Image (cartoon, rainbow, N blue to C red):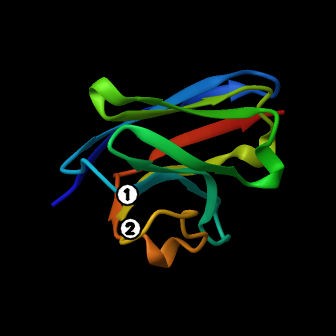
Amino acid sequence: QVHLVESGGGSVQAGGSLRLSCAAAGYTYSYCMGWFRQAPGKEREGVATIYTNYGHHFYKNYVDSVKGRFTLSQDDAKNTIHLQMNNLKPEDTGMYYCAAVRRKDEGSCPAQSSEWNYWGQGTQVTVSS
């Protein structure tokens, strides 16, 4: 069983920054972790994901709308990922969820949220104009 604990989030004005963190317990090898977000009335979308295998990280991926503004990083000692969000825009507003899924083989992480089977409780990010 995998347990994900999120922290961070909050409210900022456009152009501001926030940092999200997600600590995972129960995984050691061959898995994907990442952040998804869901705005009211919209589908959940992948924001940033990464594949990890025994402390080696591959296939980091970002949705186009956050490239150059968001950075996904890893703290292997704490089995934690961080999402640094800079130059936030009102369209970044939504509930952000940490997610994880075991992978049989090394490769890119799945894009569809339906393929991820472990989720955090979610943390709200609100960006005002």
Asked whether the beta carbons under mark 1 and mark 2 sit within 8 Å of each other, the answer is yes
On the picture, is 72 further left or further right than 100? Answer: right
Q: Is residue 89 above or below residue 29?
A: above
Nearest the viewer among 21 and 128 is 21
Q: Give me the residue at 61% from left, 25% from top.
A: 18
**In terms of secondary structure, where does tag 2 sit?**
loop
Q: Is residue 60 left or right of residue 92?
A: left
- Name the residue at 68% across, 25% down: 12
- The mark found on residue 31 in the picture is 1
Callout 2 amino acid: Arg
Query: For the N terminus, which image quadrant?
Result: bottom left
The image quadrant that residue 73 belongs to is top right
Q: Residue at x 18, y 50 (%)?
A: 26
As measured in the structure, the alpha-carbon distance from the residue carrying label 1 to the one carrying label 2 is 5 Å
Q: Position of residue 87 (x, y in %)?
A: 80, 27
Quadrant of residue 21 within the rendered picture: top left
Residue that badge 2 annotates: 103
Question: Where residue 60 sits in the image (x, y, percent)?
Answer: 62, 47
* Kind of residue sitting beneath label 1: Tyr
Kind of element beneath mark 1: strand
The picture places residue 92, in percent across and down from the top left corner, at 72, 45
Query: Where is residue 56, by image quadrant?
Result: top left
Give above or below for 15 relative to 38. above
The image's mark for residue 43 is none
